[in-house]
Amino acid sequence: MAISLLIGIIIFAVVLKYFGLESVKIIYHNINPFYLFLYALVTTSIFFINALRLKIILKAHREKVSLFRLFRQNIAGFSMAYITPAVNLGGEPVKAYMLKKECNINLRVGSSAIILDKFVEIIGTIFVGFIGLIILMTIPGVPMGVKYGLAGITFGGAAILYYFYHRTIKKKGSFSSLYNLLKFYKITKWKSLLKILEDVELKMHRFFIFHKKEFLISFLIYIVYFIVNIIEFKFLFLSFGVSLTISEIILTIVVLGLVNFIPIPAALGFFEASQSGLFKLLKDSAGTGLAFSLIVRLRNVIFTAIGFGIISQFSGEQIINKQEKR
């Protein structure tokens, strides 16, 4: 992790050195508080949309949780994920633990729901990836290596997801199989983990088989999230005087989705470099891509701070509850 973070810092410093002044000028001379305010509203609403998706999946597990509580837990999970190498996965254990303590939801049920929620999110990400691939193929001047690379990632991701789904509906759990393959049962403390994994996989199997309606609704909620994401970035770019087409915004979202899988905390450096490169290609202005990256990073830092505030409050409540039970 230390090495990957160091690489990210170096890349960030290089991008900032070459394009930092241009990006600051773009923001300073064009900043529009009205559009920035609209961006803040829309970007906050995204946490509610993601909370609604999880709420639907939990309902299929016969669990009712308030949307606001899930909203708070989503921000808490985001904050934890943001500082770990697994930006897309690092916050899930926090959400499962908070569901257990705040909502009295069994850890196995909560874990199953959260994994299914993440499964739907990844399906949606690949769906968006296919849209981005189609758009990318129509842009002249893009190196074929970039096009083939995105195609390989998109089709490869789709194949892995289908394999996971197929094994789950056939009751051939991927997590328990990996547990046995890696011989985790030899670790004394992890011997009981197999039964937990099998129980989670059974709940996921039942969801795929008996809750197709909820599965479809949760995917449609992701599509709503995707549309709102486009609106979010439209307002963000307008806030510093840049007007983009929907196709260009979708490509921005696709590139952002790809770098979030890079195992570096907050995708530091790679986020800035990828967006700078994309906008050098689209607008011949790497500074525009860096300006976008810096504002999004500021947004993420703010929500990370809010998330850790939520986690601190949650931890304090847990300590108080333990003392009262003594």
Image (cartoon, rainbow, N blue to C red):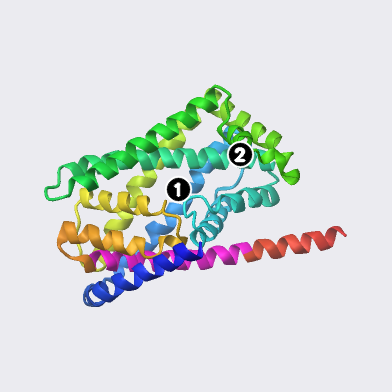
Q: CA distance from mark 2 to mark 1?
A: 37 Å
Q: Is residue 211 visible?
A: no
Left or right: 50 in relation to 36: right
- Residue 15 spot, x, y in % from top left: 29, 70
For the residue pair 177 and 219, the one nearer the viewer reads as 177
Q: Amino acid at mark 1?
A: Ile
Q: Percent from the top left, x then y, of residue 103? A: 67, 48
Q: Nearer the viewer, mark 2 or mark 1?
A: 2
Q: Which residue is mark 1?
A: 49
Residue 153 rendering spot, x and y as whole percentages? 34, 42
Does 245 lie within the magenta span?
no
Over which residues does the magenta segment extend? 288-311
Q: Label 2, on which residue?
A: 182
The first of marks 2 and 1 along the sequence is 1
Residue type beneath disc 2:
Leu
At 27% from the left edge and 57% from the top edge, which residue is drawn?
Answer: 234
Tell me what residue is drawn at x 48 percent, y 25 percent: 166
Q: Is residue 66 above or below residue 289?
A: above
What is the secondary structure assignment of the residue under circle 1?
helix
Residue 302 magenta-highlighted: yes
Task: Tell me: 247 left or right of 198.
Answer: left
Instruction: Report the residue at 23% width, 57% height from top.
Output: 278
- Residue 149 sits above or below residue 174 on the image: below
Instruction: Classify the position of the C terminus by image quarter.
Output: bottom right
- Under tag 2, what secondary structure? loop
